[in-house]
Amino acid sequence: METFDCELKQQVIFGDNTIERLGELTRSLSGSRVLVTTDKGIEKAGILARAISALQSERITAYVFADVTPNPTTEDVDAAVAVAKTNAPIDLIIGLGGGSSMDCAKGANFLLTNGGKMEDYWGTNKATQPMLPSIGIPTTIGTGSEAQSFALIAQADTHIKMACGDKKARFGTVILDATLTKTLPRPIAAITAIDAVAHAVESFVSTRHNPMSQMFSRHAWELLNAHFEACLEPHNATARCKMLFGAYLAGLAIENSMLGAAHACANPLTARYEVIHGVAVALMLPHVIRLNSTVSGEAYRELYPDGDLADRITILKQIGNLPNRLRDYPVQYTIGIGDIPTLAKEAATQWTAQFNPRPLNIKDLMTLYEQVY
């Protein structure tokens, strides 16, 4: 077997109603004054109240930033940091919600402990000082942010996504409680679930994959593929439980390998046209699989021996009522002119592009966008 380095340092609390252990877990990490980053939807669904109640049961004071936006920007992080500084000292951070809330929590942790601005941490291992203990609590079935040491934060002015990674930023504790996904509407369930599927597929063939990461990817795919359709129904607690675990495993796979061209192509679509991240990834993934098949066909067949993987992804998209065409968005294009050359140039600069199993140039990326258009 090939040599590899795999770091697994995370406490995972899995099970229904484990949110009720939040106070106990926070106290075990010496937390007494905590910052919670979340969004209005989580607050409206009553999930924030459950978290606060659990914290109060251990006499822990919580200060809340509940205005995290989809695809969080530097402004979101700065606002969360302002809440923390107004109520200093903060000794622990909790990210409660989807990937946006958890990424915002990581971003706030960078700035509260190491100072400066998010741009200072664009890349890997830029934080020189220790960071606050933190807890990640996903409420969707797809981002995998709870398993990863990277915060994806967009610049407020350009909307360019910055991947800011440091092992110290990774949540030390994760609560996987499927009851928190019960209020997830069907469309959002589909969008986050297909994102998790993309994580499993892309990490499996990433140039940085290893036997450990592929173990996570494979098991994630098996869970996600088997329970995708059933998880779209809120009452199906078993399916959502399986998807939540599958999404976590896919996040672990990313943490120990990387992603590829589908995510590289998705980021400019989100930055330029505000296409929801999961939708943008879903648009690109089948086409990326077909393009990569010249070098990764055997690996794709290993992952999905029951047929053509790209076709299976397309079927999952149809089940989730996810879009298939870029022309349904304000992307302007005719042969040789329009937005696609610019999108391709921006995709080529994305960090994940370099880990795609088939090296792609600007022309290849243009071809991908044209196929989706």
Image: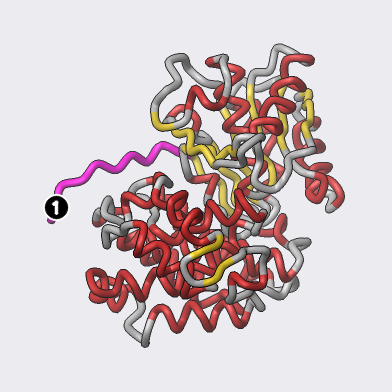
Q: Amino acid at mark 1?
A: Glu
Relative to 230, 149 lies left or right: left
Please state which of residues 187 and 230 is positioned toward the viewer in this rendering. Answer: 187
Residue 172 coordinates in the image, percent (x, y): 51, 34
- From the image, tell me which residue sits under label 1: 2
Please state which of residues 90 and 156 is positioned toward the viewer in this rendering. Answer: 156
In percent of the image, x 49 and y 54: which residue is there?
342
Picture quadrant where residue 259 is located: bottom left
Please state which of residues 3 and 54 is positioned toward the viewer in this rendering. Answer: 3
Query: Quick check: is 304 in the magenta stretch?
Result: no
Chain part drawn in magenta? 1-10
- Quadrant for the C terminus in the image: bottom right
In percent of the image, x 36 and y 66: which residue is there?
218
Residue 19 visible in the picture:
yes
Query: Quick check: is 9 in the magenta stretch?
Result: yes
Picture quadrant where residue 276 is located: bottom right
Residue 186 coordinates in the image, percent (x, y): 73, 70
Residue 262 coordinates in the image, percent (x, y): 45, 61
In percent of the image, x 79 and y 32: which residue is there?
57
Relative to 134, 187 lies left or right: right
Residue 249 visible in the picture:
no
Picture quadrant where residue 294 is located: bottom left
Relative to 10, 80 lies left or right: right
- Quadrant for the N terminus in the image: bottom left
Query: Mark 1 falls on what kind of element?
Result: loop
Residue 89 coordinates in the image, percent (x, y): 70, 12
Outermost residue on the left side: it is: 1
Magenta segment's dominant SS is: loop
Graded by Cα atoms within 10 Å as few (under 14), some (14 to 19) or many (20 or more), the crowding at tag 1 reads: few
Outermost residue on the bottom side: it is: 307
Q: Is residue 83 above or below residue 316?
A: above
| Number of on-image labels | 1
